[in-house]
Amino acid sequence: MKLLRLYLLLGILLSHWAAAWAAPIVLDAHPRGLLLGETGQLQWLADASGTLTLDDVRAPAQAARFVPAPHPQPRGGGAQAHWFKVELTQRAATGDWVLTTHTTALKDVRFYGPFDAAGQALASPVHTGLSQPFATRPLGSERYLLRLQLPGPGTYTVYARLLNETAATLDLSVWDTAEYLQWRQHKRLFDGICYGILLALLVYNLVLAASFRDTTYGFYIGQCAFALLTLASFNGHAAHYLWSDGPWWPERGNVVLPSLWLLLGTLFARSFLETHQVPWMDRLMQAVAGLALGTALLGLGGRFGVAQALNELLASTGTLLATVAAVVTMRRGFVPARWYLGGQALLFLSVLGVVLVNWQVIDAPFVLANGLQIGVAAEMVVFAIALSSRINSLRASQAMLRLHAEHLAQAAATDPLTGLANRTGLAQSATRMLADGLPHALMLLDLDRFKPINDRYGHDAGDMVLRAVATRLQAQVRATDVVARLGGDEFVILLADPLPDERLAALAKDLAEAVRQPVDFLGQALTVGVSTGIARSPRDGQTLTALMRSADQAMYQAKQTRSGYAFQTAV
């Protein structure tokens, strides 16, 4: 008895389902259109051979083969023909409706009907699709449609033959014509906003790329450009405005453009995340990029089904790989990787929303129609912020490296004991100063009675005297002059501006007086003197080496005569 009851219940359910499927679709105003696949009343027949004609499918033998349309329709390895039969009931005296597809990625689309109850066709067939010029699309619509201008109440039948090679799902919807045209205007406006965002990002980062000359910006620009073209191709605007005459590129654009988008996106991720620091990950990224390029070539060669399948595989594996790379890079301390993860998350959420709507988990037609481009635009905006963050990070690193390099250069040109310039620092300053060819003066100073201090009191005392002498010499000259210690107890002063000989002599006396002041070391007053040789450019030499040689001769003369200072005597 229990088994009998189960069979009876199953029979009742099946009869209700069959009745619902067999019932025609009642035409009524639906502001967002009526998706026929959701009603269970869309009848479907697979044409594996692709040879069935309208007369064939209307014949009783084939008509009995129509079943409720599965969601999604199965895809084979090549172009697959699908027949749909739609029965529509109009209650009003007249009606103006459109029957539309939900995708633009169809190679060949043919609408037949509507047929009245007597089987009489009320309109000419419509033949359109990617293989046909855009002018074949009724109402200039990016989607493929059949306009139904029904003369009166009754039940009408429409047949649609869709030749599919790349579309993930096939479905039809019916609209009031006025509502559809209004919805299309709103859709175009929203599409235009998304295109505008991507174009603005494209131009902005093109300018930045010209300024920074960073290859990462180039990859971003390519990714942004192909994302824009891909969206335009998916929405049908590329076929409408870019290549409306010939079918060659519209057929290929839906697979080639996404492949190039994946290629540039992978190269951008590889460059931005610097995956070369993790060799195994970098090799995987290179493999994805290579496969994306190969997929684009397959698409150009007309292998649309294979190329589409590879695009879907690469999109999922490439996104997962880029996410892992971002996490690894972020854990290595690269902060901009957080922004990259944020951009990936936004795109993932938008695609997830589209999938949930397709699976009828949520009811959000706006997300179904616009989710992908919302995600792409949001991702590109966040990636632009990520690039800015990366540039700031690189600038900070470069600034630190520059400061470090300057510190090393300064250390290499500085005497560690006194803080004065050393021989290297003096040579660098002299090169800049003497290059102008103007008069300058060089003073070479050698301390007197310094060795006995070192011998008697030790090197600590000698170092203190040298530091004190350095401080006093700097106090006597101008900030533009260069004071250097050559080593031991020898000092050099290179004067930036020319001085007459009497001023040079006065400066030599002031320097000697400053140096003679006692230096206190553990209660001992240590005193040294100084002998100064003076050379003038260009008379005594035009290079540092020549001036040093002339000043050394003058200093030797000052020591011999105990005069304290002496000028180089012209030979």
Image (cartoon, helix red, strand yellow):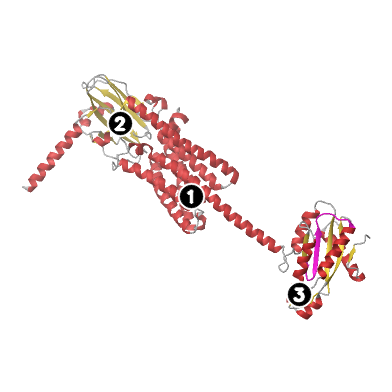
Q: Choose top left, top right, bottom left or bottom right for residue 123.
A: top left
Q: CA distance from mark 3 to mark 1?
A: 66 Å
Establish if 1 lies above or below 530: above
Callout in the foreground (2, 1): 2
First of labels 2, 1 by sequence position:
2
Q: What SS does tag 3 mark?
A: strand
Q: Amino acid at mark 3?
A: Asp
Residue 404 visible, this orientation: yes
Q: Position of residue 456 (x, y in %)?
A: 78, 80
Q: Position of residue 29 (x, y in %)?
A: 27, 27
First of labels 3, 2 by sequence position:
2
* Label 2 CA crowd tier, 10 Å (few <14, some 14–19, many 20+): many
Q: Position of residue 321 (x, y in %)?
A: 43, 52
* Apparent side of residue 166 relative to residue 426 in the rendered image (left or right): left
State the residue position of label 3. Answer: 520
Residue 267 visible, this orientation: no
Callout in the foreground (3, 2): 3
Q: CA distance from mark 3 to mark 2?
A: 99 Å
Q: Choose top left, top right, bottom left or bottom right for residue 236.
A: top left
Q: Amino acid at mark 2?
A: Gly
Viewer-side residue, 318 vs 46: 318
Callout in the foreground (3, 1): 3
State the residue position of label 2. Answer: 33
State the residue position of label 1. Answer: 269
Question: Magenta span covers which residues?
Answer: 485-501
Q: Is residue 500 magenta?
A: yes
Residue sitting at x 77%, y 54%: 432
* Apparent side of residue 571 relative to residue 118 in the rendered image (left or right): right
Q: What SS does tag 2 mark?
A: loop
* Label 1 CA crowd tier, 10 Å (few <14, some 14–19, many 20+): many
Residue sitting at x 10%, y 42%: 8
